[in-house]
Amino acid sequence: MPLPDAITDFTAHREREERRFYARRPKKIGDVVAQVITTRGYGRIQSIENLDAAWQAAAGESLARFSRPGQVKRGLLEITVGNSTVVQELNFQKQQILTTLRNELPDTKIRDLRFRVGAIN
């Protein structure tokens, strides 16, 4: 076996051993729980519930009944609304709703709201 092949083989063997050693090492429980939450999607479910609760508080009982928050993409929260009359009322209260949402969900960094008429489930 030529020397460069032996070095390559030794390096590959060493990397495999390091990975095996790391896999057998004890892990912090916080890291394991975070990995399970991420893998199973529990974090997304929790964030949807938090967003829904914040929307209920921001829009108020009467308007929240006819609307549902969607996803936040690049600071834009998409709201599905049952009819155009509710869209108009939400537009009138947009700044107040934004302020409340920012206070309720400071980590979400919501910059603006977009309303669209659609089916409310």
Image (cartoon, rainbow, N blue to C red):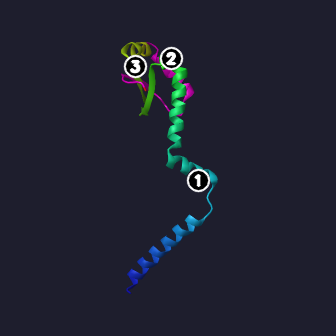
- At a point 49% along the width and 31% down the height, the residue shown is 109
Pinpoint residue 56: horizontal percent, then vertical percent: 53, 22
Pinpoint residue 8: horizontal percent, then vertical percent: 41, 77
Q: How many marks?
A: 3
Residue type at mark 3?
Gly
Q: Which residue is mark 3?
A: 82
In which quadrant of the rendered view does residue 69 lie? top left
Left/right placement of residue 29 relative to residue 70 reads right
Residue type at mark 1?
Val
Badge nearest the viewer, 1 or 3: 3
Residue type at mark 2?
Gln
- At a point 44% along the width and 16% down the height, the residue shown is 90
Q: Quadrant of the C terminus?
A: top left
Q: Is residue 39 above or below residue 50?
A: below
Q: Secondary structure at mark 3?
A: loop
Q: Quadrant of the N terminus?
A: bottom left
Q: Is residue 21 above or below residue 80?
A: below
Q: Which residues are magenta?
A: 92-120
User: Few, some or many C-alpha atoms within 10 Å of disc 1 (few <14, some 14-19, many ≥20)?
Assistant: few
User: Few, some or many C-alpha atoms within 10 Å of disc 3 (few <14, some 14-19, many ≥20)?
Assistant: some
Q: Secondary structure at mark 1?
A: helix
Q: Nearer the viewer, residue 60 or 3?
A: 60
Query: Cα distance, mark 1 to mark 3?
Result: 41 Å
Badge nearest the viewer, 3 or 2: 3
Checking the image for residue 32, the label placed there is 1
Pinpoint residue 64: horizontal percent, then vertical percent: 49, 20
Q: Nearer the viewer, residue 38 or 92?
A: 38
Checking the image for residue 96, the label placed there is 2
Q: Is residue 15 above or below residue 72?
A: below
